[in-house]
Amino acid sequence: MPVVGPRRYVRALVATCALGAGTVLGVPTSSASAAAAPTVATVATADEVPVDEAPLGVAIRSITPGTLPTAGNIVVTGTVTNRTDEVWDDLRLYAVVGDGDEFEPMRNQGELELAMATEPDEVVGFRKTQVGTPGAIEELGPGETAGYTIVLPADSVDVSRPGVYWFGVHALGDSDSVPDDDLADGRARTFLPYVPRRYDATPVAASVVVPLTQPVRYAADGSVDDVPGWEKALGDQGRMTRLLDLADASDDPLTWLVDPALVDAIAHLAAGNGPRDLGPVVPNDDPSGEPDGSPTGQPGTDPEESGGTDETDETDEPEPLPPVAGVAAAWLERLGASLQGDEVLALPYGNIDVPATLAHDPQLLEVALAQRSAALEELGVQTRPALTSPSGYLDADTIRAAPSDARVLVTDRMFGDRPPAAAQVDGHRLLVTSYGATQGSPGPARTLSSIGIRQRLLAEAAVRVIKNERRPLVATMPLEWPLDDAASFWAGLDVPWLDLGTLGDVDSSATATTVAPDDLDYTRLQERRELDAATVDAVAGLIEAGDRLQDVLIDNTGVGGTVTEEALTGLSYFARYGQTSGRLATGRSRAWVDARLGGVRISASPGVTLSSASGEFVVTLTNTLDHRVAVSVRAESDDGIEVVSPDRVVLPPRGRQSILLEARTTTNAVHNVTLMVTDSTGAPLGSTDTLPIRPTQVSGVIWLIMGTGAGLLFLAIAVRLVRRVSAARRGDPDAGRRSTRAQASQSSSRVEAV
């Protein structure tokens, strides 16, 4: 059994005293006890002090070899840290092994998992005090750390069955407040596999998968944010450099999980980490024939930034690159060499949260999968697409959306008690990774040091071998791994019953089990951790704004892709734990892009009066950017008016142009018309102006009244003429005079009426 409780400890102590075994000395007893039982040489010891109260912090840095040999010595090195305000004297450090008849080896994954939950005060082995060479430190001041070395003969370890044994280190010493007794004042624990040679014939295929991922965030202007943090990560002792040290120290090929956005961000740092460049990136072949007046190689985008001039002094020396540029360039050069011969899997660009993206905007997943790393291509690194997550959990929809050529990695926690090495789900092949192999050693506190992870990985492989279950072992290294000793890590994995290779090597030897999607366990905790709709929408909005900016800029065909790459980093799995700050960063970039879009402005007169049902009026477009732009104008009003504008207007840098718009009305009402600057698709860019348009055409009712009056007048004249002619024919001599008087009387009446 892997865990021994206090009662069993008592029985072990009594049994050992009764038997008088004298092979390995544990903890020296008091003088009275020694007198009563002088032959006692081995006792079981507990980790008596809880980890939080242990005055000495013990760390194991190396165990050579990493498995129990049949001959020779086991050499253990590490450090001891004084956590108290007192001086500690005469420190002794002993190896602790869970061997003998009292401690059964662990022989399956369940027992290894159980061991990880072992309480610090549980008895797990015997302290080896009278064999080999214990570690010794004469004095350790407050807060100080010192190294130790323990040499333990292999034949002093009493094992008879193959399996995984407890192995650890106890530190004993004394201070003013702690007497020199037999209680452990500090401890560390891990696993030590024992696999006899008869198991060497058929090794377990295994692959170590190394994530090359890190949070990437851009400032509002498109420069990489947190430059000091990147300088540290890419420096000699930084995490990014230690990852390359890990690759260089391995004699076997590795599999890398690379976020393309990470490599591109480092390439941007190497190029000087400038803001987004809106300048020309293509030759001037615009059909408009407008001259290209925008400066090349300069990122000026508005009057405040550029000083209001396009002139550049060719005699000026280029500004020196920041220190981070040299560090980043050196790292990239080394990366290209380190990845040669390894399998490189490319995650969706930005290492996006695929389940959340699929749930809220599936098109963004297509964008992320299609995006390529220019930096990796320049290094000549061939990649293959992959889908996974830091936890290894993927939902069924994500698995269904995986490209046919992608490697899909999921954790064994998504399956039942007996997870397969590979699974077939809805036509997609899944490789199953071992959660336990990357959890490190229990210590008293869980440790993810190189030695802790290595010993756990060896333990996971050992229980497969001794049970004759040659299921392949895939271990995706945890992001928390400090990468403290790459050489020791690989050296300890060089055992005959473990065959290290790439994920492709493991895939070829793994038999897939068909699993229904509903049988996969995608936990509610994982669902709650997914990015929310607001975060996804903010990223989609930034990408759309970047595309509009590229549509407007005549000579730039790259800014849309640049903004897309930057925006996708806002969907990273890392953003799950800081969504509010992530949305703020995305919002700042969106504001920067919107400000440039709003740099093309429209202005109109306070009002327009048309002389008829249609007419033309003038508006002015002003380009405040340092680059040529092509825009359109769109009008919005009620149904009683139509405004026709040119399809495309080209403006030079810092240029202004007046254009004629035609208005057509069908009513006599005043129409309030809103004019807005748009891109070629009609999407608004930001600048607007509103003006009233009034027609001056005469009402149709007035024309009807005037026409009716004229008709009556002509009718009256016709009647008079007919009467005069009729009277003349009758020979009435006064007809003409009566007619004249009548006409005069009528005229007088009309005058009075007037």
Image (cartoon, rainbow, N blue to C red):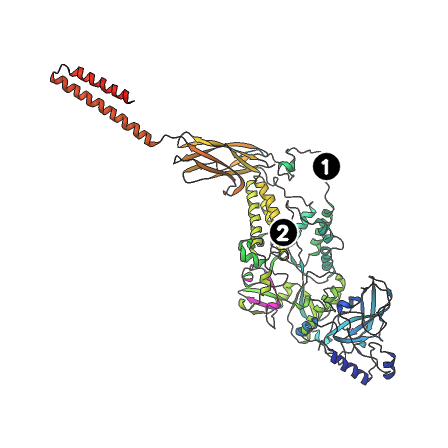
Please provide percent x and percent y for residue 683.
Answer: 51, 43
Name which residue lies at 56% across and 37% down. Answer: 600
Residue 593, placed above or below residue 352 = above
Please provide percent x and percent y for residue 87.
Answer: 86, 64
Per the rendering, the mark at residue 373 is: 2
Q: Quarter of the image containing the C terminus?
A: top left
Q: Which residues are magenta?
A: 399-425
Q: Residue furthest left?
A: 730
Residue 616, placed above or below residue 58 = above
The amino acid beneath tag 2 is Ser
Q: Quarter of the image containing the N terminus?
A: bottom right
Please give left or right for residue 670 compared with residue 317 in the image. left
Q: Secondary structure at mark 2?
A: loop
Per the rendering, the mark at residue 508 is: none
Residue behind mark 1: 317
> In the rendered image, is residue 214 in sight?
yes
> In the rendered image, is residue 558 in sight?
no
The amino acid beneath tag 1 is Glu
Please give left or right for residue 492 compared with residue 464 in the image. right
Task: Tell which of 199 and 566 is nearer to you.
Answer: 566
Quarter assignment of residue 72 = bottom right
Please give left or right for residue 417 compared with residue 232 in the image. left
Residue 524, placed above or below residue 324 = below
Residue 689 in magenta stretch: no
Quarter assignment of residue 276 = top right
Crowdedness near tag 2: few (<14), some (14–19) or many (≥20) residues, C-alpha within 10 Å: many
Q: CA distance from mark 2 to mark 1?
A: 31 Å
Residue 406 in magenta stretch: yes
Please provide percent x and percent y for residue 206.
Answer: 67, 67
Please provide percent x and percent y for residue 228.
Answer: 72, 50
